[in-house]
Amino acid sequence: MAKFEGIRWAAKQLRFLLDEKRGKILEAEAKVYAVSRSIHYGLFLTFEGIRFFCKKDGRGRLHLHFLNWHDNLERFRRGISFNLSAQQQSLVPSLEELENLFIHQYLAAPEMRDFLEEMAAKQAQGYLRPFTVDEEQSIGVTHPGKPGIRVIACLYDRYLGEPFNGVVVPSLVRAVRANGTGWLKLGINYLMSLKAIDLACRVDPTAGAALFLDDRLHLPIEEREITEWDSSCVLLAFEDGEVVKIPESPLILPSVTIKGIVAILREWGIKVVERDFLYGELIQAVREGRLVAVCSVGTAGILNRCQKLTLIDEQEKAVATHLARSDHPLFEKLGEAKQCYWDIYQEKVLPPSGLKLYKYVL
């Protein structure tokens, strides 16, 4: 199962109340009420994952780097808006307010200095985790009475990693397009992801990821479309040198990372096609040996290539098995793209067209 390894949390978190526009630095262990709509009913629970890098210059100043992170902030805003009532929409913070909150009220706080110093010394991967919660001591199936944002950061060694095995899981769907939740980072989506991995492990006990199809369960299985992995987006690479990206839709989380990986591949002259991809097409490509790699692409892990993907039918019987073609040049290029993406954060290479590196000096 995909998870963080070598993680270390910052000692402080930030609490920001949306109605009062007031923030406060708290201990990392600071709690929310046990009697809370967020705890009892899962209401007003949305979150975001934002990769960042920290370095120290010769004058002792700390530099924070984010890549295309306004896309992260906008995605977080959409999640907040979805969770609030029509009358509460004025509480949704702007991009500028979120930027100020995360950078100047949290990361730039004196209490965060030691954590960032350690991060810079280790040249570690950083992960910023804002999430929402109802701060009111209350219960009941209503919109939040005291909506708030909590923010905490960590550094870590790796996430998911290679090699990993996966299984296509046709019998579960991550989200239903009519509800408009598939493009948001909401807790219920990830609960379904965990259930899908449980199912995947029934097919392959070594499975660490599950690949979802769309929500059109009434169609023959071969006519349904590939959507996402359990907690990341998917790229498909083929022996003719083409890479397929699944288009964004109400079922697809708009990925900041996949946008960057695609920009890198295109700058290198690799053909990336954005189109729907049927499960029947995937079965045929695997049987014919045309599939080079199936990639998991997301914030924490950047890009990881699946070593073995088991494709199953409605009865959970294997109909085809893909083994990564590590001898193919495109397989190697995908690995290089992952390193290049992280190198952009560290200013070892320039970002390709369409990507912006945001820099802040503390």
Image (tube, grey):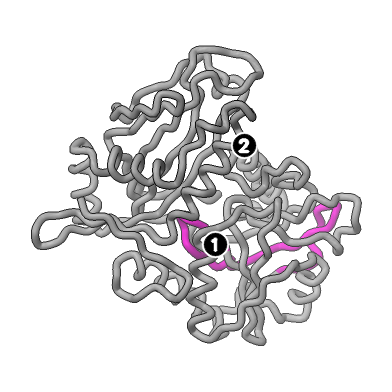
Indicate the amino acid at tag 1: Val
Q: Is residue 277 left or right of residue 127?
A: right
What SS does tag 2 mark? helix
From the viewer's side, name the closer residue of 114 and 147.
147
Q: Is residue 164 left or right of residue 189?
A: left
Are the residues flagged by discs 2 and 1 in contact, CB closer than 8 Å?
Answer: no
The residue depicted at 80 percent of the width and 72 percent of the height is: 281
Q: Tag on residue 82?
A: 2
Q: Can the viewer see residue 153? A: no
Q: Residue furthest left?
A: 59
The residue depicted at 76 percent of the width and 70 percent of the height is: 282
What SS does tag 1 mark? strand
Q: Tag on residue 297?
A: 1
From the viewer's side, name the closer residue of 53 and 162.
53
Q: Percent from the top left, x then y, of residue 199? A: 71, 46
Q: Can the viewer see residue 18? A: yes
The residue depicted at 51 percent of the width and 59 percent of the height is: 256
Residue 107 quadrant: top left
Boundaries of the magenta span: 296-321
From the viewer's side, name the closer residue of 323 and 3.
3
Rounded to the nearest whole Å, what is the CA distance between mark 2 and mark 1? Answer: 25 Å
Q: Percent from the top left, x then y, of residue 284? A: 80, 75
Say whether residue 318 is magenta: yes
Q: Is residue 10 left or right of residue 163?
A: left
Q: Percent from the top left, x then y, of residue 249? A: 70, 56
